[in-house]
Amino acid sequence: MTDYTKIDFDSLAALSDDEVVTHSFVRDVPISGGKTLALVTLDNGRDHTRPNTLGPVSLLEYAKTLDELKARAAAGEIHAVAITGKPFILAAGADLSKVAEIPDRDTARKMGQLGHFALGKASELGVPSFVFINGLALGGGLEIALNADYRTVDASVPAVALPEVFLGLIPGWGGAYLLPNLIGIENALKVVIENPLKQNRTMKADDVMELGIADAKFDSVAFLEDSIKWADGVVSGRIKVKRPNEPGKVERLVKWDAAIAIATKMLKSRIGSVPKSPYAALELMKAAKSGTKAEGFEREDEVLSELIVGDQLQASIYAFNLVQKRAKRPAGAPDKAIAKKVTKVGVLGAGYMASQLALLFVRRLRVPVVITDIDQARVDKGVAYIGEEIDKLLEKGRISPDEANRLKALVTGTTEKADFADCDWVIEAVFEELEIKQNVFAEVEQFISPEAVLATNTSSLSVEQIGAKLAHPERLVGFHFFTPVAVMPLIEVVKTPHTDEATLSTAMVTAKNLRKNAVITADTPGFVVNRLLAVLLGEAMRAVDEGTSFQTVDEAIAPLGLPMAPSVLLDLVGLKVGAHVLDTHHAAFPDRFYRSENLHKLADYGKLLDKDDKGKVKGFDKGALKIVAGGKNPRTADEILVALQDGLAREVRLMLDGDVVAAAEDIDLCMVLGAGFPFQMGGLTPYLDRVGASERVFGDTFHHPTVTGVGA
């Protein structure tokens, strides 16, 4: 086994001359029986906008501090050690900027070993160790806690998570071994695999308690004092800690491998086989059912070193920076100060999409929302749906009974457009037909204030044409959501030649208040995401029409790592919608976008996939396959993939030349947030550079290799 004490970590410290160091400050706290608890507070000296992070210098200082406390414990000076963080923050994990700079595999292995060397000391002090999770605890921050003997959690902690697989890594400082052995394999899989792949979901204090990660929970008002009292009780023997989720012999013999097998199957169906880190994490967790902690840590060191020097981590960090930095400072956004206040929202439409929008607006903005449709029955159905969804949030404990009642009271329905008179923001989500959208806006404009903003959720029509009948087209903006509305984090904000700055500013501020990321695009067919998905669907249908099987087409496009195959995407959006999307783009750019007559025939037939009663896909429908049969020139999977890569590179280049968005990074941001393009691929444009499509199509690359670390 590796002896971490004999490793020279100086080469890591040399990488970190500009590290924002998280210091380990110690003070002694008297507890009962004349004993002393040494309290370590992690603090980088910055305000709450800069969380504690763990670079090499921070870890070495933490290790030195714990060594000193071990010596004091041996001398009988202290009887327990507790670790906590500065206000509201324990730690946000490893300093990713330092991880990204690691030059080779040996140095990468040392980064894992240093984490184990430092954090592992919490269980070797000779006295009980505690971590008081007083705030944000992500990645290595949570692993600080897992390496200790006991944990408490603040009831108002904002986020606890192991997000590593989302970033192309694994929980490599003990998490992959310690967590399943603390809370059981099924619970650990939720934290390590399931949550990161659900838009990086985090846990609150109740989740942390329910899973058994923490042993006690206390309110914020006296969290530190109560945690110290509780630790005192444990040290004195007055409090006995029970952990019902700790795995026993039966779980290790029977459940463990079965849970891993189910998770592996789920992963393959949801994300394909391109991302490496989730599968690596599964292998580590599978091995964690037996053997020693030292063996588990050594396995983590090896896997982490592989992933750190691999392409996928560099790609993930590029994508992570897009989401964390560029998304928060959108290119081309006007001054927030000129945004208009939104005190009441009107939704034109009461169908499924409109009702989802109304629910989001009332939940996030907490303002009155009125919906309308062509008859009272549809309006009533929409209002009832919103009420039912609020009740579901209540049942899940996401909102309180008072909050549920308040939200329901804010939602009303009407068939009278005059009831929209006091709305500041009116958004339409009616049928995707130009004349219908033009008419509903022209009608409602008669009743609303000249200052009110009009927004359209169109996915492919010209926003400027939608406003053709408006007296004030300058207050119209595209506001394109992705389904499911509550989950998908992107809004494409579409600026027409008439849209004024106050309207655009209001749209950007409203998107932020809805907790969405917004990217400004020009008014062009398909905007960004649908235009590029139209390239994908067009290439898929062209290959099918030429005689390639749907199965081969799905396999051909799998290396992109998209959340679903083209056939499943067509089934999800609907065959008629798919045909409409291709038709719209073919009409706008007939030389570049393919129109498939077979797709129209499939839409009329109404079915592509054969499913069982529960909606599970069994295969392709035989009747559908007969419709598309007859092509005489099938292509190989490799030929289809290259054609798709080149088509995407060509379209992205044209979009950038046409100023559809400000930069290639905005296209990458849209594809990550709106199309599920995986973090491990690092955005579409670096991927196209890596596979040579950029060079093939326009003789250059979208990025210089040194800019993203993932260029060609």
Image (spheres, helix red, strand yellow):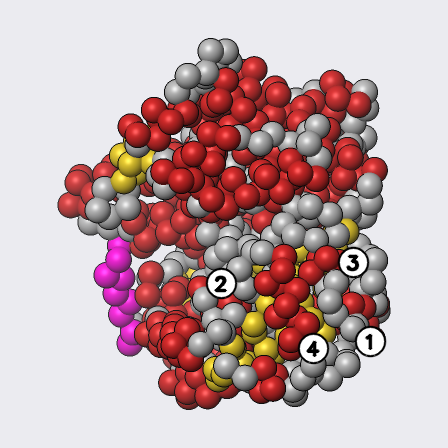
Residue drawn at x 28%, y 46% as measured from the top left: 615
The answer for how far apart the CA atoms under marks 2 and 4 are is 22 Å
Nearer the observer, 121 or 312: 312
Q: Reading the chain from its start, which is encountered first: label 3 or label 4? A: 4
Residue drawn at x 66%, y 38% as measured from the top left: 587
The answer to whether residue 242 is magenta is yes
Q: Which residues are magenta?
A: 238-246
Residue 402 screen position, x and y as percent? 42, 88
Residue kind at label 3, given as amino acid type: Thr
Residue 598 screen position, x and y as percent? 46, 29
Residue 123 screen position, x and y as percent? 43, 53
Residue 52 screen position, x and y as percent? 64, 60
The answer for how far apart the CA atoms under marks 3 and 2 are is 23 Å
For disc 2, the marked residue is 353
Residue drawn at x 54%, y 34% as measured from the top left: 537
Q: In the image, 538: left or right of 605?
A: right
Residue kind at label 4, given as amino acid type: Glu
Residue drawn at x 61%, y 33% as measured from the top left: 535
**Foreground disc of the pair 3, 4:** 4
User: Is residue 450 in sight in this rendering?
Assistant: yes
Circle 2/circle 4 CB separation < 8 Å: no
**Foreground disc of the pair 3, 1:** 3
The answer to whether residue 127 is magenta is no
User: To which quarter of the image does residue 665 belong?
Assistant: top right
**Foreground disc of the pair 4, 1:** 4
User: Is residue 308 in sight in this rendering?
Assistant: no
Q: Reading the chain from its start, which is encountered first: label 3 or label 2? A: 2
Circle 3/circle 4 CB separation < 8 Å: no
For disc 3, the marked residue is 496
For disc 1, the marked residue is 337
The answer for how far apart the CA atoms under marks 2 and 1 are is 31 Å
